[in-house]
Image (cartoon, helix red, strand yellow):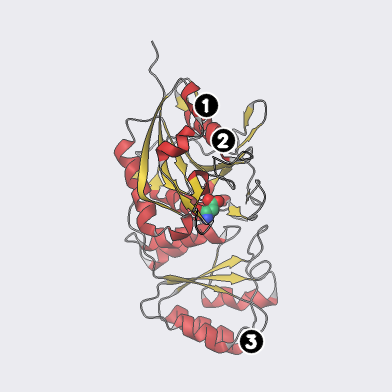
Amino acid sequence: MSKQTKILIIYTGGTIGMVEDKETGALYPFDFEALTQQIPEIKKFKFEIDSFSFDPLLDSSNMTTQDWIKIAEVIEMNYEKYDGFVVLHGSDTMSYTASALSFMLENLNKPVIFTGSQLPIGVLRTDGKENFITAIEIAAANINGRPIVPEVAIYFENQLFRGNRTHKFNAENFEAFQSINYPVLAEAGVHIKYNSTAILPFPKKKFTVYKEMNTSIAVLKLFPGIQKEVVESIISIKGLKAIVLETFGSGNAPNVPWFLDLVRTAIKNGIIIYNVTQCRGGSVEIGRYDTSIDMGKIGVVGGFDITIESAIAKLMFLLGKNYTKKQIWKLLQTSIRGELTVA
Ligand code: ASP
């Protein structure tokens, strides 16, 4: 007899399990028991389904790197026991957590599927039921015992995405996530159609969990008219290790002397500057325009088509390991979990 598939649900919070506060009308997360009562369908699965709940449950806007580490630990502790993991998570910061987990879980050979919803599961028109049920099905999907999706992914509104390629682009529609620079991993209609060529290959090396995330980073979003004082104050933050520089178009920034001087000073002071475009599609191409050529010369690192969410998580992850600056520099321009495409 073949062994029964086992799935662990990690419930962190988010709208999917929220109810309305009677006084304020605001949504807050409720317990797993209450959530599953709204979805008796999951009892029909032939798999063994267990759960682990965060305490307290979180609106994902309150998530910190400690919570990412906790998810990683729960997966690590239960890795051998389960065939796949479903992480119920608020959609607001889901792309950040999924990106972070993709880096923290090296040589992952089991599915870790994030999902949530825009409407609570107790609401009649909820999108949560379909998202939850299909996420479980994907986490359990295998061919001859080998998981079909051995990676950290987000399932939302009929589509499965590589987690570190996504961003939340809509606060209203059920279709809340996009992955503009990378194809969907699966599409759920009558059948779940897996895009096997887009899914990461099954790893050969040993599964390893990394739990150090260094948060000494900042994000500097450029805008026309940005003042010198703003840039100055960010680069002079004590102990700062890296800046995600959100640039225009294909990685462009004002090529005025004051700006380039400040960037040069920051790099001299040991701060890594990671050039990531504000555009959600396309890639950074340092040197394509005059407005990026100098940044390349002074040592700004280009992030190709990485998302902002993934860039932040990747920097925290790389800074948390004992790499030299040179190694970090190289890895930032290399795809380590399928998070970017080198152009
Ligand atoms: N504020 C909620 C959260 O991110 C939104 C959601 O779950 O969709 O936790």
Residue 256, labelled with which disc? 3
Q: Identify the element where label 3 is drawn.
A: loop
* For residue 47, above or below residue 262: above
Image quarter of the N terminus:
top left
Q: Identify the element where label 2 is drawn.
A: helix
Assess whether mark 1 and mark 2 are in contact (beta carbons under 8 angstroms): yes
Q: Residue at x 46, y 26 (%)?
A: 146
- Residue 203 in picture, x, y percent from top left: 43, 37
Q: Is mark 2 within 8 Å of ligand 1?
A: no
Q: CA distance from mark 2 to mark 1?
A: 9 Å
Q: CA distance from mark 3 to mark 1?
A: 61 Å
Image quarter of the C terminus:
bottom right
Q: For this rendering, which residue is in front, 124 or 192? A: 124
- Residue 306 in picture, x, y percent from top left: 57, 57
Assess whether mark 1 and mark 3 are in contact (beta carbons under 8 angstroms): no
Q: Quadrant of residue 304?
A: bottom right
Residue 41, labelled with which disc? 1
**Kind of residue sitting beneath label 1:** Glu
Q: Residue at x 45, y 42 (%)?
A: 87
Q: Residues within 10 Å of mark 2 (few under 14, many from 20)?
A: many
Q: Which residue is mark 2?
A: 129
Q: Residues within 10 Å of mark 1 (few under 14, many from 20)?
A: few
**Kind of residue sitting beneath label 3:** Val
Mark closest to the chain's N terminus, 3 or 1: 1
Mark closest to the chain's N terminus, 2 or 1: 1
